[in-house]
Amino acid sequence: MRVLVTGGAGFIGSHLVERLLSDGHWVRVLDDLSGGRLENLDGVRNHPCLQVVIGDVRDLATLQAAMEGVEVVFHLAAVVGVPRVLADPLRTIRVNVEGTERVLEACAERGIPVCIASSSEVYGKGVRWPAAEEDDLRLGSPTVSRWAYAVSKLLDEHLAMSWARRGLRVSVVRYFNVYGPRVDPQGYGYVIARFMDQALRGEPLTVYGDGRQTRSFIYVSDAVEGTLRAGLLPAASGHIFNIGHPEEISILALAERIRVVTGRQVPIRFLSFSEVYGPGFEEAPRRVPDVSKARVLLGFEARVTLDEGLQRTWEWWRTCRRV
Ligand code: UDP
């Protein structure tokens, strides 16, 4: 197939591109390199079936040209990562909402199936855990910048569901803390990137708060598999899927795990949220997915264990990472 991946030079996007190429597809990447890096595509740069277009997904002429001849779209281009969102919530909302709106319209005009990347951040502070796709959501106040990202992604999801009701083949994937090689210290996989960076430099691992907040981490090749199934299987249309690993771990336990995996006996340093993010920051205290819908409808389950995934990420981090 001929596939368009927006955000294809980003962390998850570049892994998706590699996988699509190795599966025999022709791939066009559209990325403005605001968060992505061309280096992420180094391994496939000279592949005859890859075309890279540098541009903003919101620019209509750029998007129209990028859609030319395409049979399926994966829309991953977005402002992601807590630091970037806090630095510019307005840009976060604009890029994430306008971008998705334009991509959905372009796909609807041409009748092209599309998979929209969303985030577990939409669960916010959470109503119940593990969280399922049709559960209620609990977000903080708009006076707290952090929630701008969740709201932008939630609006993307509403746009997607509205277009689905009008007959567009569209699915949504909610990623739960994806990590792996090429993890972005400013964007996705922030905590793992930071801990590995600190371990490599022999500096203390900075645990925010008391470290008892939890997350579940999914290795990038698993996240790509779930994304492909959601984008390519007709049965996925009109649905939202949690793409996550069901193992829940506290951030303090993660720091300890990273000390073991890296073999660096660095100390752990606790920092309060206000020290790091300033006053009024709100944390998501827990986050773990109910994965049954993806298992039943997509036949998808994450396979890579946290230890295995951390090992592979560390291998890349200490040998290949370029700052
Ligand atoms: N975190 C931490 N130390 C760091 C970076 C992050 O303890 O140096 C924590 C953060 O407070 C959160 C978790 O790690 O509880 C995951 O943070 P990240 O920004 O990666 O993603 P989030 O799940 O919060 O969007």
Image (cartoon, grey):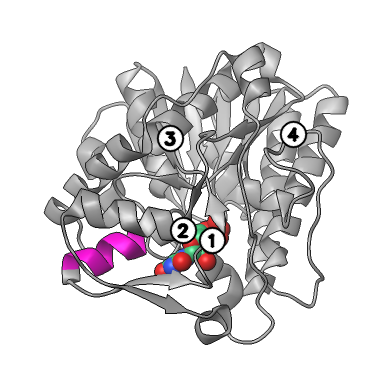
Tell whether circle 2 marks a residue whose Cβ is less than 8 angstroms from ligand 1.
yes
Which mark's residue is nearer the viewer, 4 or 1?
1
Residue at 58 percent of width and 84 percent of height = 274
- Going from N to C along the chain, the mark reached first, 4 or 1, is 4
Q: Earlier in the sequence, mark 4 or mark 3?
A: 3
- SS class of the residue under badge 3? strand
Q: Is the CB atom of the residue marked by disc 3 within 8 angstroms of ligand 1's nearest atom?
A: no
Numbered badge on residue 251: 2
Look at the image and tell me whether residue 79 can be seen: no
| Mark toward the viewer: 4 or 3 | 4
In this rendering, the answer to whether 25 lies above or below 65 is above
Q: CA distance from mark 4 to mark 1?
A: 25 Å
Q: Which mark is residue 133?
A: 4
Is label 1 within 8 A of ligand 1 (CB to nearest ligand atom)? Answer: no
The mark tally for this picture is 4
Q: Is 138 in front, or is 88?
A: 138
Q: In what element is the residue under mark 4? A: loop
Q: Kindly identify the amino acid type of the residue bearing the numbered disc 3.
A: Arg
Q: Amino acid at mark 4?
A: Glu
Find disc 3 in the rendering and name its residue: 28
Amino acid bearing label 1 = Arg
Residue 169 position (above or below residue 74)? above
In this rendering, the label closer to the viewer, 4 or 2: 2
Q: Is residue 282 visible?
A: yes
Q: Which mark is residue 212?
A: 1
